[in-house]
Amino acid sequence: MESRVAVETVEAIGASTSALAVYVDLATGSVPSGSPVPADGSAPAAADPLRDQADAYLDGLAELAKVEARLAALKVQLVAGYANTEKAMTPPAASPQERTVREMAVTAEVAGVLTISERAASALRFEASTLTTGRPVTLSALQAGSISWQHARIMVDEAADLDAAGAAALEAHFLDPDAPNPARGGPAGELVPCRFRAKVLTWRERHHPVSIEKRHARSAADRRVEYVPDSDGMAWFSAYLPAAQAAGIWDRTTAAARAMQGPGETRTLTQLRADVASTWLLTAGHELTPAGGVPSPAAQVLVTVPVFSLLGLTEEPAMLDGYGPIPPSVARALVADGGTSFRRVLTDPRDGAPLEIGRTSYRIPKPMRQWLRLRDATCTFPACNNHSLDNDADHLLAWADGGGTGISNLGQPCPKHHRLRHASAWTPAAATAKDPPGWTSPSGRHYTSEQPDWEPPHWPPLIQAILRELAAPGGLDPRTPANPGMHECRVSPEDVPETGREAA
C-alpha cells in the first residue's frame, strides 16, 4: 500500500515538474510569449512579452509550491516506510531498553541520511507516522499540493491530544469541502500557516473533549516570567500569562506607543512598545519621554461571549479579540468587573455572528470600528497578521466615488498595507456584513480573505427541555419557536444592550 502511494506521489511530482519547466521556459524567453501553458490548457495570451513573463514567474512559483508539498509528502512516506520495514525485519525486543535502543538507531539513520539533527529526525518520524496512519485527509491534501508542509505539521500538532473521531472531524472541517460544516473563507492552503493555526486552534478549543476550564486551570498554574540573555548586550524578557491579561497588556502598550508617534518621534512603533513596557515596569510610568509624559489609555479588548455562556448555563468558550478562545469563567469575570478596558459583545443566537449597525455619515464612529475588529480580526491583506487594534478603518469604495459608511464598505488594513493600497495597484475586493474584503494584486490575481468560523451557540439542556414541552401536543405556544436554532431572529441596534452597542 505504502509503495503504491509513493509511486503515485512520484508520478504527480513528475507531472508538476514538466509543467514547471514550461513556466521557466516562458519566463526566460525560451518559448514565444503567449504560448499556451499545459497546466490549464488556456489559449495564447495577447502579445505582451513583459506581462507574459511576469505571469510566468508567478505561475511558476505557484506550481513550485505544489512540487514542494508533494516532495514533503514523499519524504513522509519514505521515512514511515523505512521505519516500518526496519521494524518488520527485527525480532521483538527482549526488553524496554532494547526497544529504546532500536528506536534510537532508526532515528540516527534518518538523521544521517537527511543531514539533520537527531531531535529533528525524531520529530519527523513522529509526524510521518501520524500522517501515514492517522491523518489520511491531511496526507492526501499534501500529496495533491493543496496544502504546504507547514499546514500539515499544524494539523498534526493541534490534533495530537484529540481522539480519533475528534481528529477526523478537525481534518474534515478544514480539508474536506464536502464536509457537513466546512470552514468558511476558502481552501485551507490559501491561508498563511500562522493564520491557519489560529483557525485550527479556535475549532479545537470549541470541540475539545476536555473543557477549556479544566485545561486553562492546569496551564495557568504554569504562568511564569522568563529572562534569556542574548548577544550584543541584549536579552529576551517574556511572560507566560493568562490570555486576558496578556491581551490587555499588549493592547494598552500598543495604544500608548501609538500616542507617542508624531513628526518629531524617530522611534518605530516596535521600539516605542519596548520603551513603554520597560518604563512602566521599572518606574511605574513616571519617567516616560518625551516631555509631558505619555497618556496611558485604557486597552479596548473585545470579549465576544455567547449569551448562555455569559449566564453560566453553558461552558462554551468566549472569544478574546487578538487571541482566540478563553474559558467562559474568565469572560464572565471580565464582564462582571465592569472594567473600561473590556467591551462585551453578544452574538446572533442563530449562527454566532456579530450584527451589523448601519451608518450614513462619512465619519466612522467608534462602535463601527469595533464591529470591524470583530469581523476582520486582523489586517485582511494576504499573509498579514497585524492585530486589529493597530489597524486603520478604510472605505473600500471611496466616499467621493459614492461609497457609503457601512460595514459592507469598510476594511481595516494595517498602516503599512493602507499606504500600499493608495500608492499602488493593490485593491481591496468587495466585503459583506460578515465577510472581510479580499485583495486583487497588480497582476490581476485575487486573494480571498480569512473568515471567522462562527458557530451557533449551544442551547442549555434545561431550555431545550422546556421547548420540547412547549412543542408537545397541546402544549405549544405559537409564539415560541419549536427549534430555537432555526427560527427567524431579527435584532435591531435598539435591541442590543448598552454595553453591546458600545462594542458594536
Image (cartoon, grey):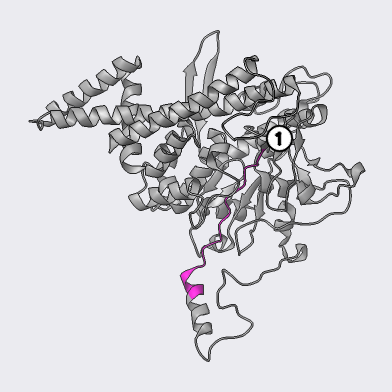
Q: Which residue is mark 1?
A: 390
Kindly tell me whether residue 225 is visible in this rendering: no
Figure check: 23 above or below 152: above
Can you say which quadrant of the picture contains the N terminus?
Answer: top left
In magenta stretch: residue 450: yes
Name the residue nearer the viewer: 241 or 79: 79
User: Residue 113 vs residue 254: left or right?
Assistant: left
State the residue lying farthest toward the top: 232
Quadrant assignment, res 247: top right
Q: Tell me where residue 321 appears, x and y as whole percent.
A: 62, 44
Q: Secondary structure at mark 1?
A: helix
Q: Is residue 195 above or below residue 83?
A: below
- Give the camera-side residue of 255 and 156: 156
Q: Residue at x 36, y 44 (%)?
A: 161
Q: Is residue 222 magenta?
A: no
Residue 425: give x, y in percent of width and height: 79, 29
Residue 456 versus residue 235 in the image, above or below: below
Q: Is residue 190 visible?
A: yes
For label 1, count other residues whose C-alpha is less than 10 Å away and answer few (under 14), some (14-19) or many (20+). some
Q: Locate residue 245: give its quadrant.
A: top right
Residue ID at (45%, 53%): 207
Q: Residue at x 10, y 30 (%)?
A: 93
Per the picture, the main secondary structure of the magenta-coloured stretch is loop
Residue 202 coordinates in the image, percent (x, y): 51, 46
Q: Left or right: where does residue 252 sit relative to residue 106?
A: right
Residue 225 versus residue 220 in the image, above or below: above
Q: Residue furthest bottom?
A: 474
The amino acid type found where label 1 is placed reads Asp
Residue range highlighted in magenta: 447-464
Give me the residue at 30% from left, 27% from top.
79
